[in-house]
Image: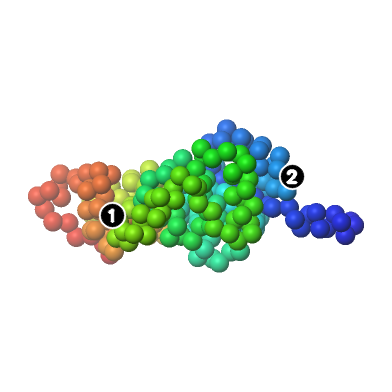
Amino acid sequence: MTMKNNEEKKSTIRVLLADDHAVVRAGIRQFLERAGDIQVIGEASDGEMAVEMIERMAPDVAVLDIQMPKATGIEVSRVIRAHRWPIGVLILTSYDDDPYISAVLKTGANGYVLKTASPDEIIHAVRDVYQGKSVLDTEILPKVMAQIANPNPAPFYESLTDREIEILSLVARGLTNKVVGIKLKISDRTVQGHIARIFEKLQAASRTEAVMRGVSLGLIQLPEETLDHAITFEI
């Protein structure tokens, strides 16, 4: 391989694309790779797959949707920063709600761009993130400025997966990790991992607080027996 080819290869931006809609991934991949200096090295259809592929393939930039099965783009971004992986994170989503914007920026993501942006804008965003720059969609800039002016916004709770809601419902019945695991045919350790993520998403410090928050958000309902009798939740 010649020196020129080495330089060309070095200048290519290696991208991992994560979105749970195959048609959306195909469209984004098509115009990114037409740019010439961007190569999509892998596609993930859920958050857990994205984390596994990012760790294994070490892309230069991860382009993540927010709402994905198993783990959100927010969680994936948080994992990337927690491991200090030298990867640029670009959130590409349809959501422009204040809580999502705040949650994404707190993870240390490099960019937040809406899917309504043009292909050229998204391509430039990938390049900027690769160069270590921060990128914000012009449509969300006013909301970011408003958040800076109001540093105490209403709390944002990340969405729970169907499995997490199922586990929280069982926890609400006062079941231990072991019993929950038996019912769902998973290990105690797996149950504990799900509960830890539920705590993080609902900003809860205990099982009781997680259950109460789940009820207040309409995610679960307390079983009838808990309405008349107090339940002791396993710590």
Position of the C terminus, as image quadrant, is bottom left
Along the line of sight, the residue nearer the viewer: 17 or 152: 152
List the residue tagged with mark 1. Answer: 154
Q: At 9% from the left edge and 50% from the top edge, which residue is drawn? A: 228
- Rendered image quadrant of residue 199: bottom left
Circle on res. 10: none
Number of marks present in the image shown: 2
In the rendered structure, the answer to whether residue 97 lies left or right of residue 73 reads left
Q: Secondary structure at mark 1?
A: loop
Give the colouring mode of the picture: rainbow
Comparing 104 with 134, the one in front is: 134
- Which residue reaches farthest top? 23
Say which element carries label 2. loop
Looking at the picture, does residue 192 appear above or below residue 50? below
Give the alpha-carbon distance from disc 2 to disc 1, as whole Å: 43 Å
* Residue 6 lies in quadrant: bottom right
Q: Position of residue 90 (x, y in %)?
A: 55, 52
